[in-house]
Amino acid sequence: MALTPDQQRAFRGFLTLSTLLDDALDAQLRRDSGLTHSQYRILFRLSEAPERTIGMRRLGVLAHSEQSRLSHAITAMERRGWVRRVRSPTNPDRRAVSVVLTDAGMEVVRSAAPRHSDEAHRLLFDALDAEHLSNLNAVIDRILPHMADLGLDLPSPEEDPIMWEGRSDPGPADRTQAG
């Protein structure tokens, strides 16, 4: 089905916004913290996880990273002492691996977070008043359940309580902590 002109405009605008935001946040993190945006997403997700540990497969979903790219990033961060791999404590498959955020990695997140947050504010939220922000959240509230209904894997309310605050969990596709 072809997109209508309004749908084309919205879709292209959304993709451009998403790409520009990701690129600008990546540049800020590289400049200020020596991290890529994908590394920050991995470290950030680990920093909020119980015992700062997540299975590799689930971490890939939460950090929006394909497994080969995730494995490469984890290897690089292991060399810097920010994370370590361990046999998954919750998965009976002996090959399952979890990633643990070290104290050094936690300090990297704590150090990077304020400037990263400032940049997100500058790029996105400075352009929105309270009504715009409410409208943005209303759009997200419509799209998240739709994507869950289509079988896309979303972070659970336990994995991302801030994202879900005030929202209804659309229900798990198959959200396991298996790793």
Image (cartoon, rainbow, N blue to C red):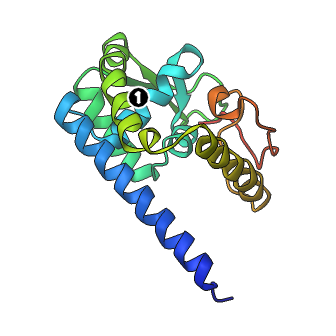
The residue type indicated by label 1 comes to: Leu
Q: Which residue lies furthest to the bottom in this view?
A: 2
Question: Where does label 1 land, which residue?
Answer: 43
* Side of 73 relative to 57 (left or right): left
Question: Can you give x and y, in whole percent of width and height, for residue 124 in the image?
Answer: 43, 44
Image quarter (top left, top right, bottom left or bottom right) of the C terminus: top right
Count of numbered marks? 1
Q: Residue at x 40, y 37 (%)?
A: 120
Front residue (pair 128, 94):
128
Question: Can you give x and y, in whole percent of width and height, for residue 131 in the image?
Answer: 63, 42
* Side of 109 relative to 62 (left or right): left
Q: Is residue 5 visible?
A: yes
Q: Which residue is drawn at 63% across and 84% down?
A: 3
Question: Can you give x and y, in whole percent of width and height, for residue 127 in the image?
Answer: 44, 45
Indicate the secondary structure of the residue bearing disc 1: helix
Residue 58, by quadrant, is top right
Q: Residue at x 67, y 26 (%)?
A: 161
